[in-house]
Image (spheres, grey):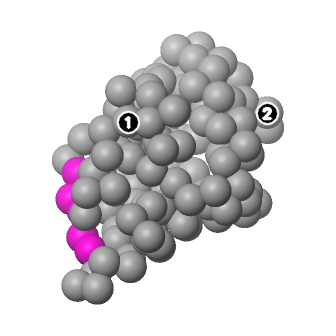
Amino acid sequence: MDVVHRYFEAFNAGDTGGMLDCLTDDIAHHVNEGQVRTGKALFRAFCEHMSRCYSENLTDMMIFSAANGTRAAAEYTVNGTYLQTDDGLPAATGQTYQLPAGSFFDIRDGRIARVTTYYNLADWIRQVRA
């Protein structure tokens, strides 16, 4: 699915604008362990926050899509560095981590209308505390 590939290419390039170009204006962003954020402005704010606190690159990417093009999923490995302490989480000291993760997408008119991301937060906390 081309739009999902472009979305992840932009993610790995640190290109928030490129990610936003892949989204509908009313994007529903379901964050792991968090609230649903609706709209590009909240998605951009989330990306800016994440870029301050984390440096991440996704590898081992496998993208799956429904035959009708309305749904997609991806499984990948998150390779990251914890840069700045995030509220309510352990202190950041440049720790590195590696996590399996997945994202699920609704596609509408060639753009991503929903993205839901899952990873094991307890595993991440264990890794950055080690």
The residue located at (45%, 28%) in the rendering is 15
Q: For the stretch drawn in magenta, what is the main secondary structure? A: strand
Q: Residues within 10 Å of mark 2 (few under 14, many from 20)?
A: few
In the image, is 16 to the left or to the right of 75?
right
Q: Quadrant of residue 65?
A: bottom left
Q: How many marks?
A: 2
Return the residue nearer the eye: 130 or 18: 18
Q: Is residue 98 above or below residue 115?
A: above
Return the residue nearer the eye: 83 or 2: 2
Q: Residues within 10 Å of mark 1 (few under 14, many from 20)?
A: some
Q: Is residue 120 above or below residue 84?
A: below
The residue located at (67%, 62%) in the rendering is 26
Q: Is residue 63 magenta?
A: yes
User: Farthest residue in the top direction?
Assistant: 93
Position of residue 99 measured from the top left corner of the image (x, y, whole percent): 39, 46
Q: Which amino acid, by three-letter code, is at mark 1?
A: Ala
Residue picked out by circle 1: 10
Please provide the residue range marked out in magenta. Answer: 61-65
| Numbered circle sitting on residue 87 | 2
User: Farthest residue in the bottom direction?
Assistant: 68
Disc 1 secondary structure class: helix
Whether residue 98 is visible, yes or no, is: no
Position of residue 70 measured from the top left corner of the image (x, y, whole percent): 38, 79
Disc 2 secondary structure class: loop
Q: Quadrant of residue 52?
A: top right
